Amino acid sequence: MSLDGIDLWQPAVQISLDLPTLEEALPMAEVAMEAGVDWLEVGTPLILGEGVRAVRELRQRYPSVPIVADLKTMDGGYLEAEMMAQAGATFVVVMAVSHPATVRAVVDAGVRYRIGVMGDILAAQDRAVAARNLEQAGVDVIIAHLGFDERHANPGSPLDFLGDIVNSVKIPVQAVGGLTLDDLPQLPGLGAPLVVVGAPLVIDNHAFSPASERSQLRRILADVVCAVKDRSK
């Protein structure tokens, strides 16, 4: 499967810029690009804090890099996807638990504006059914997502249910939430080739920021990129 030249089955590393301001997110994006990360995600906190400006700024700085706008759309699907597409997003995210009409609206906007649609199964009662419904609606990627609040209330990992999702659909899957750096290289071999690294990063109880730990953060991200792509061969 490909989207305007992007092979969605080819392992790729995406960094999630889950930071509330561009002042914080842009240095992280710069380090990620230096480390060989493939995709940039405008995380939900950054969209809330900066809006479409965040997508426009990243698109201006990185004209050829795929950009994921993590809208977590629940309603007003066409307009939200349209706004992000016009700002330069490559992908938008719609929630499986939204109304089917919302999913269809986001997919319709994706077709109209030639952008990809990711369907997030966060909070779905039956994850496999939700994934199949998203696939039938025309989304391009399934996000097997264990949410921040959910995993703190009930510790777990997307690895607990990833196999069920991969076996339920024929489109690429992305696993998100509660994964360690050691987990990430395994994902392409488990059927989830689009690998996400969260940012800000907390590793061994040490918080990394590009302002204070730029070289170390670059090395960590570069190691992830190499491990993911080497392991997938």
Image: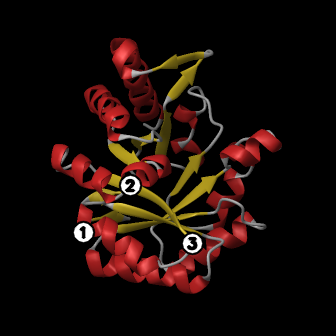
Front one among 38 and 1: 38
Q: Identify the secondary structure beneath mark 2.
A: strand
Q: Is residue 15 toward the left or the right of residue 155 in the image?
A: left
Q: Nearer the viewer, mark 2 or mark 3?
A: 3
The disc label shown at residue 68, or none:
2
Q: Nearer the viewer, mark 2 or mark 1?
A: 1
Q: Earlier in the sequence, mark 3 or mark 1?
A: 3
**Residue at the spot of label 1:** 86
- Assess disc 3: are there few (<14), some (14-19) or many (≥20) residues with their C-alpha within 10 Å of its C-alpha: some
From this viewpoint, is residue 51 visible?
A: yes
Front one among 21 and 123: 21
Q: CA distance from mark 2 to mark 1?
A: 13 Å
Residue at position x 71%, y 58% in the image: 164
Q: Identify the secondary structure beneath mark 1.
A: helix
Q: Position of residue 150 (x, y in %)?
A: 75, 48
Amino acid, disc 2: Val
Q: Position of residue 199 (x, y in %)?
A: 47, 34
Tags 2 and 3 touching, CB below 8 Å: no
Residue at position x 43%, y 19% in the image: 220
Residue at position x 44%, y 42% in the image: 20
198 shown above or below 10? above
Q: Is residue 73 toward the left or the right of residue 214 in the image?
A: right
48 shown above or below 130? above
From this viewpoint, is residue 156 visible?
A: no
Q: Earlier in the sequence, mark 2 or mark 1?
A: 2
103 shown above or below 22? below
Amino acid, disc 1: Gln
Amino acid, disc 3: Met
- Asked which quadrant contains residue 32, the reply is top left
Q: CA distance from mark 2 to mark 3?
A: 17 Å
The image's colouring method is: secondary structure
**Residue at the spot of label 3:** 74
